[in-house]
């Protein structure tokens, strides 16, 4: 499948915009087509007030160092690997969020700098995926997160990067990358019967009820621990996400809605995190929180 074709836009038909049946609109009394148009207007209006902002840098005052060319990465859609640490027995993969302009590799490198300085002895690499190019691609990018997450699970199974093969794998995911990460462990457990060590979510753009529903088994049986770091100061999730998602809350904004498995841990970092991209910042973020969960 050619994952890179940007063919589905916000204005597409209601059925194709929600092929994930767990993400149907909560209201059946309003046509999906009219709601999608309203959401598009809302998102476009908010985006316009912030210039060329994306979900990765809307209201972001932080500037991350450029990622060096030697930094490792995987592109799950094509199974392409760059400077991959083959043979590593402890691997932390950073998954970026919505749009391809949000500095995903730079974010990953910032996570690497922080963890390395904290004494983390494993490898940190990036997961680079096609997450859309503009606000028009939001609903398409959500579908893409499902498909790429499933492909990443297939890669884990193929190469044996799982707990039962003695490899400690951790996913650190930002924003819509959180959906990709949870789809990955859902597929890894449900289809292949494997698990990884941990998933660590930063400002996850995932409906707050889904960890207790769609992703329940993936979290419970596909991870040793899943940590959700959320902030009620995050305007991207509090404004833009809710506008696009018909008023629903993200677990990266309010925490899980309840009913999550016992190995799901909510961490309210509202006292520390003011902006959507701040999670990864070396000085003001909270990467150092996850260090103890990576072994």
Image (tube, helix red, strand yellow):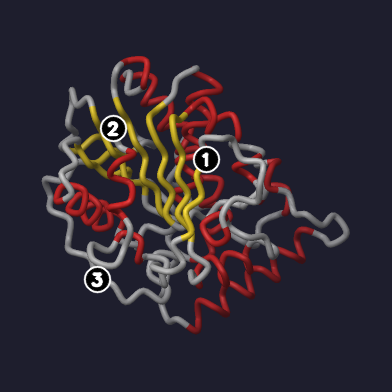
Q: Which of 4 and 209 is in front in this view?
A: 209
Q: Is mark 1 in CB contact (under 8 Å) with mark 2? A: no
The answer to whether 166 is drawn above or below residue 43 in the figure is above
The answer to whether residue 163 is left or right of residue 5 is left
Q: Nearer the viewer, residue 15 or 236?
A: 236
To which quarter of the image does residue 76 belong?
top left
The answer to whether residue 206 is left or right of residue 165 is right
Q: Residue shown at 22%/56% (left/top)?
A: 110
Residue farthest along the bottom direction in this orientation: 49
Say which mark, if any, is on residue 264.
1
To which residue does mark 3 refer?
63
Residue 127, position in %: x, y?
A: 32, 43
To which residue does mark 2 refer?
295
Q: Residue shown at 33%/58% (left/top)?
A: 286
- In three-dimensional space, the C-alpha distance between marks 3 and 2, rounded to whole angstroms, equals 29 Å
Quarter the C terminus occupies: top left
Mark 2, other Cα within 10 Å: few <14 / some 14–19 / many ≥20: some
Q: Which of 205 and 36 is in front in this view?
A: 205
Q: Tag 2's secondary structure? A: loop
- In three-dimensional space, the C-alpha distance between marks 3 and 1, rounded to whole angstroms, equals 31 Å
Sequence-earlier tag: 3 or 1: 3
Residue 230, position in %: x, y?
A: 48, 58
The answer to whether 285 is drawn above or below residue 16 in the figure is below
């Amino acid at each position: 499948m050619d994952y890179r074709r940007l063919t589905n836009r916000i204005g597409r038909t209601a059925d194709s915009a929600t092929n994930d049946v767990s993400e149907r609109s909560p209201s059946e009394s309003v046509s999906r087509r009219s709601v999608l148009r309203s959401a598009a207007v809302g998102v476009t209006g908010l985006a316009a007030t912030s210039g060329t902002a994306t979900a990765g840098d809307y209201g972001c005052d932080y500037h991350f160092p450029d990622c060096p060319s030697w930094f490792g990465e995987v592109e799950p859609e094509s199974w392409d690997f760059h400077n991959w640490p083959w043979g590593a027995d402890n691997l932390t993969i950073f998954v970026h969020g919505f749009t391809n302009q949000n500095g995903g590799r730079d974010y990953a490198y910032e996570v690497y700098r922080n963890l390395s300085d904290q004494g983390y002895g494993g490898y940190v690499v990036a997961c680079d995926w096609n997450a859309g190019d503009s606000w028009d691609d939001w609903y398409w990018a959500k579908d893409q997160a499902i498909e790429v997450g499933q492909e990443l699970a297939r890669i884990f199974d193929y190469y044996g990067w799982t707990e039962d093969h003695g490899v400690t794998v951790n996913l650190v995911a930002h924003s819509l990358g959180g959906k990709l990460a949870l789809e990955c462990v859902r597929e890894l457990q449900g289809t292949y019967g494997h698990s990884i060590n941990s998933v660590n979510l930063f400002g996850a753009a995932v409906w707050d009820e889904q960890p207790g529903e769609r992703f329940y088994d993936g979290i419970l049986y596909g991870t040793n621990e899943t940590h959700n770091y959320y902030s009620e100061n995050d305007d991207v999730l509090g404004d833009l996400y809710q506008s696009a998602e018909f008023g629903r809350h993200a677990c990266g904004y309010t925490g899980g809605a309840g009913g999550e498995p016992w190995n799901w841990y909510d961490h309210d970092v509202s006292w520390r995190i003011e902006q959507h991209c701040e999670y990864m910042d070396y000085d003001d973020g909270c990467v150092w929180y996850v260090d103890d969960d990576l072994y």
